Image: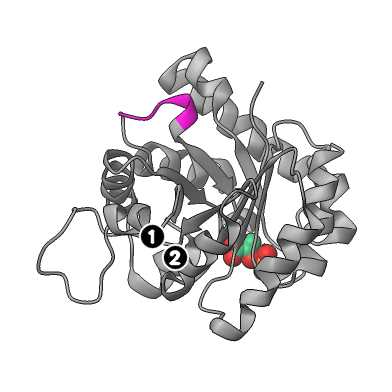
Amino acid sequence: MVRKLAAGNWKMNGTAENLGEVDALKAALPRPEVDVLICPPTTLLSRVAERLDGSGIGTGGQDCHSVRAGAHTGDISAPMLADAGASHVILGHSERRNDHGETDADVRDKAKGAIAADLTPIICVGETLAEREAANTLAIIGGQLAGSIPDIVTGDRLVIAYEPVWAIGTGKVPDTDQIGEVHDFIRAKLEQRFGVGVGRAVPILYGGSVKAGNAAEIFAVSNVGGALVGGASLKAADFAPIVAALQGA
Ligand code: PEP
């Protein structure tokens, strides 16, 4: 049975004045029946983790360096995220790939660093609109999976997030057949490479304009094991109904 996961990615949003949303989420989800994560900016990570202690809601980072420590001004390592309370780290988000030129090989090295620090990497893959229109979606996703996932993963130490770049923050969402096609493809690739046991245990999240209004429909699609949520994770009133939809799926 694959654990379901709803992960909220706050991106570069949030200061101390937003911490009330964490308390509100805790109050709205007293006993979450699925895994729930908030991935705040690193400046808030330890404060969010402290507030969520004992709530059943976890925290994650949004990126990490591949090595444990050293002369890398401005970077954050995986052991630092773990020390601040994180259990997971988002890696290879399309905004990191675009803004910082991160390659599949970079993502793979970061994932190795994360696993070495006992963090679970949430590795993001997804096609651009031009790639989808050129009928290259599965080839792109296949290449990103092959290049970004290290060989050392186990089923309980990996999450994949399928995030079509054109659906992130745009309000556009692929139809359920399109989502199902990619999620089934990802599952098949994981089983091929890591064997059925490991391949079946990896949660595959959908991400891209998930809202309370479309969550239940998306969670009913085959091999969708949850969501990576950007904008709608910033307010507990928006995020809690998405978690509720996942609990009911
Ligand atoms: C994201 O950035 O991971 C994301 C899915 O954003 P949004 O939900 O805002 O589309």
- Which one is earlier in the sequence, the residue at label 1 or at label 2? 2
Quick check: 76 above or below 104? below
Whole-percent x, y for residue 218 in the image: 80, 46
Q: Quadrant of the N terminus?
A: top right
Instruction: Name the chief secondary structure element in magenta.
Output: loop
Name the residue at 51% across, 78% down. Answer: 12
User: Which residue sits at x=80%, y=54%?
Assistant: 242
**Is the residue 159 above or below the residue 184 in the image?**
below
User: Contact, CB < 8 Å: mark 1 with mark 2?
Assistant: yes
Residue 235 can be seen in this image: yes
- Quadrant assignment for ligand 1: bottom right
Specify the amino acid type for callout 2: Ser
Residue 170 in which image quadrant: bottom right
Q: Disc number at residue 84? A: 1
Label 2 belongs to which residue? 46
SS under mark 2:
helix
Looking at the rendering, in which quadrant would you find the C terminus? top right
Image coordinates of residue 32 in percent, x first then y, are: 74, 44
Seen at 31% across and 29% down, the residue is 151
Magenta stretch encompasses residue 119 = no
* Callout 2 crowding tier (Cα within 10 Å): few <14, some 14–19, many ≥20: some
Does residue 153 belong to the magenta stretch?
yes
**Farthest top residue in view:** 196
Give the total of numbered labels.
Answer: 2
Residue 97 position by quadrant: bottom left
Residue closest to the eye, 37 or 232: 37
Segment tinted magenta in the rendering: 152-156
**Amino acid at circle 1:** Ala
Whole-percent x and y of residue 178?
A: 74, 44
